Amino acid sequence: VEDGDGGGDGDGDGDAVRVGVELLCVVRAVLKKIKRRVLVGDKVLVGSIDWVDRRGVIENVFSRKSEILDPPVANVDHLLVLFAMEQPKLEVYSLTRFLVEAESTGIPITLALNKSELVDEETRVAWKSRLRSWGYGPVFCSVESKFGLDTLAFSLREQTTVIVGPSGVGKSSLINALRSNHPLINVSSEENNWFDSILGSKLLEEQRVGEVSVRSGRGKHTTRHVSLLPLSGGGYLADTPGFNQPSLLKVTTQSLAQTFPEIRKLLSGSANEPEKCSFNDCLHLGEPGCVVKGDWERYPYYFQLLDEIKIREEFQ
Ligand code: GDP
Ligand code: ZN
């Protein structure tokens, strides 16, 4: 965005206009001084624009509606949690950890299950009802046989999405499939070429210093550099997948319950009368007057994760 009338009050509306071209920018020194880091996905105020060389100076960063650290992206409004039905085998504990980490960001989640061509219909139906009981409506897909990619592309429209999941489930394959083949996600190559020519060489120089392998053939992206691919249906997809190992560092013993849709549902009660445990700080471990009963599949995992977080908090 560019400062439209010089107001620059930082409230993100009224005086901001979309420029629609890419500018190579430096960050105003004062922002660095107050440790205001600029992230990919940030909405920024740009001044001192040189339209010929397409350069500018980032004067301010608008407040973020969300922020994730792995990969570092601001204003993410959708997380696509990707797992595989097989290779690696779909495993409840690992899936739960990823879902808890994703839920803890407060960002809406779509759960997708890739490599679904490797299992039969019966298995898919069984998982579907199982995941429904957890509170998730999964999308089955297969990058290999192009199955379900339309549904996924649809869920990405008008949003900034980061794909997260363990290694080997097909995250990079999915990003590539969505990038190269899908009509809804047709990246404008002309703009990207310009960007590559200016940014590419510079970034490569900087990143080579840090001993990073450059993906062969492309010569632009490294594992550390995040780009947002513009989607033709509106919105963006981060080209770098996120949290390979959920650390759960932002989850506390008090906040863990809210990352389980099963518990959220029990606590929401009926439409006009929310259920309440007797104790405000109830951890739902069978305390007197607790409205969360342990008769749901993932309760043992809730219990296990709570223990892990408790130990971490004791040592902090
Ligand atoms: P990432 O680590 O999550 O980024 O996973 P990759 O995209 O590197 O994929 C891991 C492996 O799974 C590669 O060998 C892919 O070719 C393979 N793969 C990706 N999608 C599918 C799929 O839908 N079906 C099958 N059978 N293999 C797939
Ligand atoms: Zn309770």
Image (cartoon, rainbow, N blue to C red):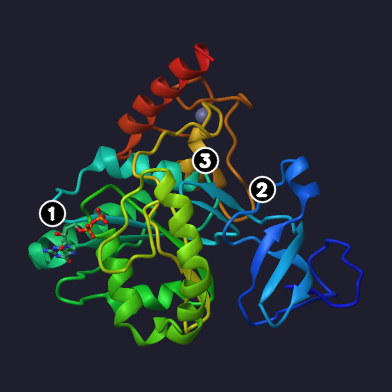
Disc 1 on helix, strand or loop? loop
Q: Are marks 2 and 3 in contact (CB under 8 Å)?
A: no
What residue does disc 2 label? Answer: 37
Task: Name, please, the residue furthest toward the top.
Answer: 315
Which one is closest to the eye, mark 2 or mark 3? 2
User: Which quadrant of the figure contains the C terminus?
Assistant: top right
Q: Cα distance, mark 1 to mark 3?
A: 29 Å
Q: Report x, y in % for residue 235.
A: 53, 74
Going by the numbered disc 3, the residue's amino acid type is Gln
Q: Is 224 rendered above or below residue 310? A: below
Q: Which SS class for mark 2?
A: loop
Q: Which mark's residue is nearer the viewer, 2 or 1?
A: 2
Q: Is residue 88 shown left or right of residue 301?
A: left
Q: Residues within 10 Å of mark 2 (few under 14, many from 20)?
A: few
Q: Closer to the N terminus: mark 2 or mark 1?
A: 2
The numbered dot on residue 258 is 3
Residue at screen point 92% across, 69% down: 7
Circle 1 sits on which residue?
86
Q: Amino acid at mark 1?
A: Glu
Where is residue 167? Give x, y as percent.
25, 48
Q: How busy is the neighbourhood of tag 3: few (under 14 within 10 Å), some, or many (20 plus)?
A: some
Instruction: Give the residue displayed 66% in from the left and 78% down from the top.
Output: 53
Q: Secondary structure at mark 3?
A: helix
Asked whether the residues under the numbered discs 2 and 1 touch, taking CB atoms below 8 Å apart as contact, a structural biologist would say no
